[in-house]
Amino acid sequence: MKDMKKFIAINLLTIGLLIGTSVSNVGELYAATTQEVSLTLSNKGTYYGEVQNGKPHGKGTATWGEYKTYTGEWRYGKRSGQGKLVTTVPDINQVIYEGTWANDKQNGQGTLREYSKFNEYSKEYDRATAQQGSFKNGKAVSGYTVIRDYTLDSEVAFRYMTNDVIVAFSLSDANDLNAPLKSENMSLFAFVDLKKGSGFLMQYNNNSQHMYQYGTYKKNLSGETNLFNGTIELFNWHYDEISIASVQKSKIASYKVVPTSEELHKYRESIIKKKLNLLDPYMSNFKKIYNQL
């Protein structure tokens, strides 16, 4: 029963400025914004570029120490417009954001790439992550995510998320991305239509356990997308059994264990194969982002 509960809450791992000026002031404003000078910023950074009234305004570059640099547009002392921020922690990771800024934070369309190396603190394998889409106050809120683990099998995960839809799948071997997708090569496959509330999730947890859930989905107060009403089927080949739970209002309403059925497993596999075409509208961007890592 406890094993089933942990599968219920699956988080499918969610401006403008107009300046008016008179004709007589145009030359003065132009001179103020095109003058390039060096400044010391209040947050201990150094800046070189265009200024106005003693603040970064226009185009310029700011550095904070040796490993953090922003190059791009500024407005009244804050990063606003198009810009690129590179932050590096030697021998640990590097984060690069390119895109739109507002009020000194990532706001608007952009791409965030992070490269992490194995180290004694994280205990994780080398990993590359890319997020492309809409950002709000420094966080990605919608769009594409690609995660590549540089393990022996080079696992790769893909996700697309908006307010209307969640699409996710993982491959144990990134080389399978160059061939027609097959359900047997996936470790995870999910599709949820948030407008209709319907969807499914298939997950291969290990060699002996497969999970399939389907039904209606809703977001909880924390913004996580959970199975609200539906069914969870847990295929456990090690014990030759299938655990089946009925879910109502995000809680298990009934639960039973039945002997393994090869026919039922094949039936579920056939359903998954028929749903692979749901990925077609997203594959081009998934591959493009993956190739940029």
Image (cartoon, rainbow, N blue to C red):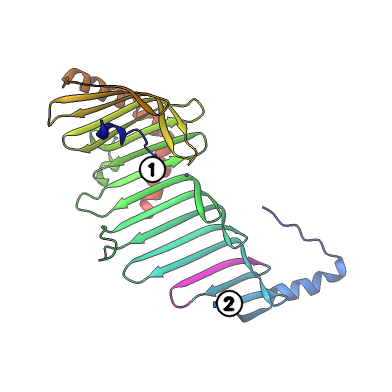
Q: Residue at x 39, y 59 (%)?
A: 114
Which label is found at residue 47?
2
- Circle 2 packing at 10 Å, graded few (<14), some (14-19), many (20+), is many
Task: Tell me the mark number nearer the camera, choosing from 1 and 2.
Answer: 1
Left or right placement of residue 291 versus residue 83 in this view: left
Kindly report the distance in space between the C-alpha atoms of the residues bearing marks 1 and 2: 38 Å
- Circle 1 packing at 10 Å, graded few (<14), some (14-19), many (20+), is some
Left or right placement of residue 112 versus residue 242 in this view: right
User: Compared with residue 61, is residue 100 higher up or lower down, i.e. above or below?
Assistant: above
Check disc 1 and report the residue beneath it: 13
Residue 46, given in percent of the width and then of the height, sits at 56, 79
Helix, strand, or loop for circle 2? strand
Q: Earlier in the sequence, mark 1 or mark 2?
A: 1
Q: Residue 211 in magenta?
A: no
Residue 284, given in percent of the width and then of the height, sits at 41, 41
User: Compared with residue 67, is residue 265 higher up or lower down, i.e. above or below?
Assistant: above
Residue 137, given in percent of the width and then of the height, sits at 56, 55
User: Compared with residue 170, is residue 132 higher up or lower down, i.e. above or below?
Assistant: below
Helix, strand, or loop for circle 1? loop
What's the magenta region? 65-75
